[in-house]
Amino acid sequence: MVKTTFSKTFNSTSSKNRHFDVCLMDETHRIKFPLKSFILSSDAKQLVKRLANKLNFPIVKYNPKSVTSK
């Protein structure tokens, strides 16, 4: 997310806010259920490891499958 602020003299200041989301997804990654958002990736990874261990789910990065027309 980028936040831009303009002054009366049209000078601008931009700042980026990165965040790391932890989500449950279906096999195709088309349906995402967001659980929590973090500023630090290390905090997100800790939660992911705990959830994967308790729920017996694999840890995967978001990568939706391409839809092909028939």
Image (tube, rainbow, N blue to C red):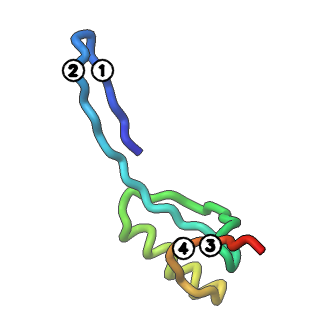
Quarter occupied by the C terminus: bottom right
The amino acid at mark 3 is Ser
Which residue is identified by label 4? 63
Could you tell me which residue is drawn at 53 percent across and 71 percent down? Answer: 62
Q: CA distance from mark 3 to mark 2?
A: 42 Å
Residue 1 falls left or right of residue 59: left
- Dot 4 falls on a residue whose secondary structure is loop
Which residue is identified by label 2? 11
> N-terminal of the two: label 3 or label 2?
2
**Image quadrant in which you'd find residue 66:** bottom right
The amino acid at mark 2 is Asn
Asked whether the residues under the numbered discs 2 and 1 touch, taking CB atoms below 8 Å apart as contact, a structural biologist would say: yes
Could you tell me which residue is drawn at 50 percent across and 81 percent down? Answer: 49
Q: Position of residue 25 (x, y in %)?
A: 66, 72
Q: Position of residue 23 (x, y in %)?
A: 59, 67
> N-terminal of the two: label 1 or label 3?
1
- Dot 2 falls on a residue whose secondary structure is loop
- Dot 1 falls on a residue whose secondary structure is strand
Which residue is identified by label 1? 6
The amino acid at mark 4 is Asn
> N-terminal of the two: label 2 or label 4?
2
Q: CA distance from mark 2 to mark 1?
A: 6 Å
Q: Which is closer to the viewer, label 3 or label 4? A: 3
Which residue is identified by label 3? 66
In the image, residue 7 sits, relative to residue 48, either above or below, namely above
Q: Which is closer to the viewer, label 4 or label 1? A: 4
**Of residues 33 and 63, the one drawn nearer to the viewer in this rendering:** 63
How many C-alpha atoms fall within 10 Å of the one at disc 2: few (<14), some, or many (≥20)? few
How many C-alpha atoms fall within 10 Å of the one at disc 1: few (<14), some, or many (≥20)? few
